[in-house]
Image: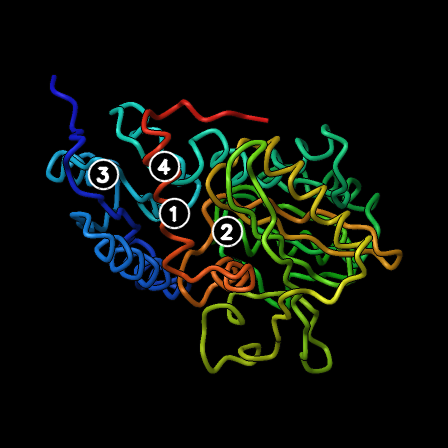
């Protein structure tokens, strides 16, 4: 069988056009992926490279898009398939199998970071700082789960176990005790699947570390801090509504400070643990590590995000602009790294 790859073919910008999400509560995030795809397509065309764009909803659509375009490279923006964000890594698996070069992290890094409990276990196993947590599983004995939850310090935050882009994060996500944590998990099970993560809530400053590069060559861009200006009774968290729903109660109630106004020693610790996590998880080309600071200024890793939002208004582009790189330069750097890498699977893990 002839491989659907052509060294003289176009750059294919592949994104999630997920019909299973478009009409639901998380539809705005789907529109955000399209915004990124169109902006990247424009940058690629500025380089006088042939380029195409394709939205996909499932694995069959990925295969059809590759067969039709026969691309020299895929700019991979697929975040979900069949309405399931846990299938984000499936597109990268398919591209690896087909031998098509592509941007961003490989399937192992994507799958690991998408599974929040597994990612936290990996962080802990690596000796990297992360808050204590428990996994809540639908159908398990409620009494046993409540007993297990009782070993955590409250307040805690309860999240879906396998989503990103703040899906499932609401003010009610921060809970005061074990019964409230279990009740919140029951709500998430109905919407996002049979597992939820409950972790101790770190109430300190929230920092985002944007990273570009691969392995030893990866570097932190200027750090960002999210400064919250929420009303009484609202926890200082980035909810789905705050990120995606213009006009919501949480919309516009936070300010991003970039570069983050941190003491040099604190910033250095944030950059060190962020790069350690990024490299250890096998992330490549670009990513973001989200952290909180304890009252003593020690960083605690919340999540490692491979292939984060690349829209011109998103956090990674903002940090790049303080480098200072233009948006075009950021995208061109990612594109050049993937073109140079060429053969899938040839990336180095630190």
* Viewer-proximal residue among 80 and 290: 290
Label ID, residue 338 = 4
Q: What residue is pinned by disc 2?
A: 164
Residue 165 position within the rendered picture, expressed as x and y whole percent measured from the top left: 49, 56
Q: What residue is pinned by disc 3?
A: 62
State the SS at label 2.
Answer: loop
First-in-chain label (4 vs 3):
3
First-in-chain label (2 vs 1):
1
Q: Residues within 10 Å of mark 1 (few under 14, many from 20)?
A: many
Label ID, residue 79 = 1
Residue 35 position within the rendered picture, expressed as x and y whole percent measured from the top left: 32, 63
* Viewer-proximal residue among 329 and 195: 329
Q: From the viewer's perspective, is residue 337 above or below residue 51?
A: above
State the SS at label 4.
Answer: helix
First-in-chain label (2 vs 4):
2
State the SS at label 1.
Answer: loop
């Amino acid at each position: 069988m002839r491989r659907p790859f052509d060294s003289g073919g176009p750059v294919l910008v592949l994104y999630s056009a997920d019909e299973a999400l478009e009409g639901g509560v998380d539809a705005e995030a789907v529109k955000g992926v399209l915004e990124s795809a169109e902006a990247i397509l424009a940058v690629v065309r500025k380089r006088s490279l042939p380029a195409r764009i394709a939205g996909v909803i499932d694995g069959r659509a990925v295969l059809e898009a590759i067969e039709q375009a026969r691309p020299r490279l895929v700019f991979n923006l697929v975040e979900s398939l069949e309405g399931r964000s846990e299938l984000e890594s499936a597109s990268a698996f398919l591209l690896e199998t087909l031998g098509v070069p592509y941007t961003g992290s490989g399937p192992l890094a994507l799958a690991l970071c998408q599974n929040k409990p597994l990612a936290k276990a990996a962080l802990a196993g690596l000796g990297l700082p992360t808050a204590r947590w428990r996994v809540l599983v639908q159908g398990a004995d409620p009494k046993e789960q409540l007993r297990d939850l009782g070993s955590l310090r409250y307040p805690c935050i309860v999240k879906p176990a396998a989503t990103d882009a703040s899906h499932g994060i609401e003010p009610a996500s921060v809970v005061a005790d074990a019964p409230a944590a279990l009740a919140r998990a029951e709500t998430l099970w109905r919407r996002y699947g049979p597992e939820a993560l409950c972790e101790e809530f770190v109430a300190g400053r929230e920092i985002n570390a944007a990273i570009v590069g691969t392995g030893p060559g990866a570097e932190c861009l200027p750090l960002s801090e999210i400064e919250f200006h929420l009303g009484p009774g609202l926890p200082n968290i980035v909810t789905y509504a705050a990120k995606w729903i213009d006009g919501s109660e949480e919309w516009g109630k936070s300010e991003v400070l970039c570069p983050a106004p941190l003491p040099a020693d604190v910033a250095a610790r944030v950059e060190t643990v962020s790069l350690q996590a990024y490299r250890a998880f096998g992330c490549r080309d670009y990513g973001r590590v989200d952290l909180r600071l304890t009252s003593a200024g020690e960083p605690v890793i919340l999540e490692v995000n491979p292939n984060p939002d690349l829209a011109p208004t998103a956090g990674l582009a903002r940090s790049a602009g303080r480098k200072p790189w233009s948006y075009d330069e950021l995208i061109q750097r990612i594109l050049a790294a993937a073109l140079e890498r060429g053969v899938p699977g040839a990336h180095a893990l630190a």
